[in-house]
Image (tube, grey):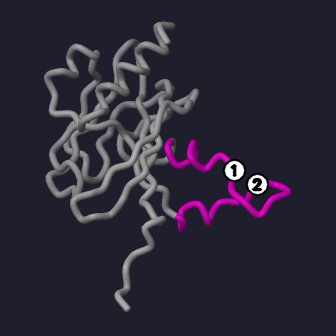
């Protein structure tokens, strides 16, 4: 019998669109990345079991609540050196990486709170952009559309 991976298992990625004074942070990925090498994206990262297992469980449960917001804030700190606030769900999507691993992306948006951008591991550049400026960048497909959704929410057009 062939040993096939469980088709129900996915990498879970949490991304965050950060708004600051009408602009949005994008980061350029390293050429070493498996998916979308050298493209621009928003901060985010994978949900990793051994990272949340070290956290205290939510009182009166055997579980970890609010782990998405925790992971997003941790990843934004690691990739961009920023603190954020007002984390809110935006959308979700799936894709299959070039190495055939399925990925579930949970996309959130938040507001800048403090800090200066400090590039993390595997991030080679950063920019604060308007939507119009975003058209000039090689951004992962769908990300600029998500930024436009956030801009519409902020401007009260959604």
Numbered tag placed on residue 65 in the rendering = 1
Q: Residue at x 36, y 59 (%)?
A: 102
Q: Looking at this view, is 73 or 102 the one in front?
A: 102
Q: Position of residue 35 (x, y in %)?
A: 23, 53
57 in magenta:
yes
Residue lying farthest to the bottom in this orientation = 1
Q: Looking at this view, is 81 or 64 the one in front?
A: 64
Q: Position of residue 85 (x, y in %)?
A: 56, 29
Q: Position of residue 80 (x, y in %)?
A: 36, 40
In the rendered structure, which segment of residues is drawn in magenta? 49-72
Q: Give the crowd class for mark 1: few <14, some 14-19, many >=20 residues within 10 Å.
A: few
**140, above or below 3, in the image:** above
58 in magenta:
yes
Residue under pointer 2: 58
Question: Which image quarter is the N terminus in?
Answer: bottom left
Residue lying farthest to the right in this orientation = 60
Question: Residues at badges 2 and 1 in contact (C-beta under 8 Å)?
Answer: yes
> Where, by quadrant of the figure, is residue 96 drawn?
bottom left
- Looking at the image, residue 69 sits to the left or right of residue 27; the answer is right
Q: Give the crowd class for mark 2: few <14, some 14-19, many >=20 residues within 10 Å.
A: few
**154, above or below 54, in the image:** above
> Where, by quadrant of the figure, is residue 140 drawn?
top left
**121, above or below 107, in the image:** below
* SS label for mark 1: loop
């Amino acid at each position: 019998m062939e040993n096939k991976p469980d088709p129900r298992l996915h990498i879970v990625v949490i991304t965050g669109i950060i708004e600051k004074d009408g602009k949005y942070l994008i980061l350029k990925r390293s050429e070493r990345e498996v998916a979308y090498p050298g493209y621009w994206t928003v901060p985010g990262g994978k949900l990793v079991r051994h990272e949340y297992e070290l956290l205290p469980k939510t009182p009166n449960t055997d579980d970890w609540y609010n782990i998405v917001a925790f992971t997003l804030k941790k990843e934004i700190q690691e990739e961009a050196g920023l603190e954020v606030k007002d984390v809110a769900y935006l959308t979700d999507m799936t894709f299959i990486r070039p190495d055939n691993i399925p990925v579930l992306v949970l996309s959130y948006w938040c507001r800048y709170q403090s800090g200066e951008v400090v590039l993390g591991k595997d991030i080679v550049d950063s920019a604060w952009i308007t939507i119009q400026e975003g058209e000039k960048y090689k951004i992962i497909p769908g990300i600029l559309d998500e930024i436009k959704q956030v801009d519409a929410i902020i401007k009260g057009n959604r």
